[in-house]
Image (cartoon, rainbow, N blue to C red):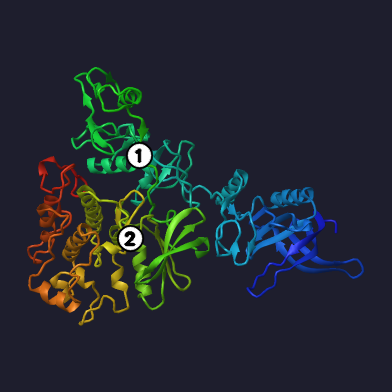
Amino acid sequence: MSDNILEDLFIKRSQQKKKTSPLNYKERLFVLTAEKLAYYDYDADKGVCLRGSVDVEKIKCVETVEAEPNAPPERKFAFQVVYDEGPLYIFAKTEASRSKWITKLKELVHSNKDLMQKYHPCFWADGEWLCCQQEVKQAMGCKILDKKNVHDYMLSQEKPSRPLPPQPEPAAPSASMTVIAEYDYIPMTSQDLELRKNEEYTILEKSDPNWWRARDKYGKEGYIPSNYVAETETGLERFHWYCKNMNRSQAEQLLKSENKDGGFLVRDSSKAGKYTVSLFAKSGAETGGSCRHYNICTTPQGQVYLSEKHNFDTIPELINYHQHNAAGMVSRLKHIVSNRARPPSTAGLGYGVWEIDPHYLTFIKELGTGQFGVVKYGKWQGQHDVAIKMIKEGSMSEDDFIEEAKIMMKLRHENLVQLYGVCTKQRPIYIVTEFLANGCLLTYLKEGLIQHPTADQLLEMCKDVSEGMAYLESKQYIHRDLAARNCLVDANGTVKVTDFGLSRYVLDDEYTSSVGSKFPVRWSPPEVLLYSKFSSKSDIWAYGVLMWEVYTLGRLPYERLSNTEIVDQVSHGFRLYRPQLANERVYKIMTSCWHDVRERCNSFKEDMRDCFCIVTNVALCFTLRSQMRGPPFKSWC
């Protein structure tokens, strides 16, 4: 056959396409042409008989496979050809033979459109991958291919160029917006644009608040996640030590969690246009160290200083000097501490993506069981942490939820658990969300995952929830099931609200009253208990109960009362008692949430601002209107 590129006798492992298929090894004649990789039964007397083939254009990966422990000599030089039906394992007789076939196959497949970026370097055996112990055969690989393969893959994904459209009518010039990338971003779809940290980009379009169309310095255009970039207002965005949107309490919490002597950051001051250096030092009198805050002052000539004897033209110059000299501070600036170590969650896994292919999901471990079904921790495309809710059939009004999910994906806030997408083309349906390492807030409180919480930490948790709820309210969204069990905690201790709006789709009786309405009784106000009337004010009531949960470290509200007794007593004015860890001012905030609906706070956005402001180092809440600036729930003392 004149068009044969390579042919050789190799051992082939059975592909076990069915669970009942046996595992065996047989010698086959392999023949490679430009179109196919075929293998045959070979007999010197009877000739050849085709046993199978793989179209070259369907090959996704060609790589070596690590030999199994105690493998016989004839199975030492394995390689794999991965295509739609899984890996085809082939055993060459020598390393030279294996290398020759891999090289030639890679030459043939380098422009295939579905080349893999990751692969499994070990065999699939006994129901799992030996390299990473994943139990799904179609799971994304665990080892990154070499850069050339990834480059070929990215080129293969680019769509062919289209003819240029007719020139539009001249339009009035608009001022372009320049941003700087705070994080690297690897494109997840062909429409996305790569971001490289600290490089500048020009914003071309902001019609979608979560995904902006941008151009890089090479002229390439695409969509970027808007929360990965910052406007170049001051130039400080380039520096890792600058934490723009951080208040004093958050700075202290972050510095203490890092627990590094000389750990520091620079943040915006509560005074407009001013900056503060927050520093953690272990040399002070306090056991375990303490935080100091130094205002960056400005001379009449425009220079900046921390110590009057040492003036500088710019803040970066000032920081550089004090990284080597204490010059009046409790310590020199030794270690940069940043809240930008981990990139934030994106609104979806790429621009315009909301339906997720389940083949790209890897299930790693079970996290728990909720009202809708099992929740598992996993990976998307083998590298992005996700939580996967597997909706048990019959637990949810599925069609209604699918329509709602498209809207919910557009909601993005640092105190909301991000919905990445859904898998709706199979059953059960999957809901794919951001994964938060510290899990449920209720468990976090009850099981002591936060060691000896301070009043500031408890208040910070409540503040996180209130900011997420204020955002939901601004989008005319009612949660309906706000409680500690429906909040999650990330690795930095930030609390995020989850499951907003999902209670409307519950089909079981867990939240059902005698009149058939669905609601959580212990977190519901009288107008819901009696008339099933939901509003943002019923969310405010539930928020007060959540605060009570936080300050009791996870106790059950009205723990000695049945649901029926709660309906009766709450309707007649009974309220939860003041927790031991809550002072009178904190309890006043709770009770303001439990007024009669006509007297209750008008909204999270408005009246909650007046009664809930953090005062650092003092476990008190009081109104500081004169010192607050910006929109409600965005400025905290």
For residue 245, say whether it is visible.
no
Could you tell me how far apart the alpha carbons at marks 2 and 1 are, in whole angstroms?
25 Å
Q: Nearer the viewer, residue 403 or 341?
A: 341
- Label pair 2/1, CB-CB below 8 angstroms: no
Q: Position of residue 327 (x, y in %)?
A: 28, 21
Please tell me whether residue 329 is drawn above or below residue 441 in the rendered image: above
Where does label 1 land, which residue?
338
| Residue at position x 9%, y 70% in the image | 574
Q: Quadrant of the N terminus?
A: bottom right
Whether residue 485 is situated above or below residue 145 in the rendered picture: below
The number of numbered badges drawn on the structure is 2
Picture quadrant of residue 560: bottom left
Which one is in front, 589 or 382? 589
Callout 1 secondary element: loop
Which image quarter holds the C terminus? top left
Q: Residue beneath label 2, please?
A: 440
Would residue 195 be seen by someone viewing this image from the given angle?
yes
Mark 2: which secondary structure?
loop
Picture coordinates of residue 576, whole percent (x, y) = 13, 65
Q: Hey, what amino acid is under mark 1?
A: Ser
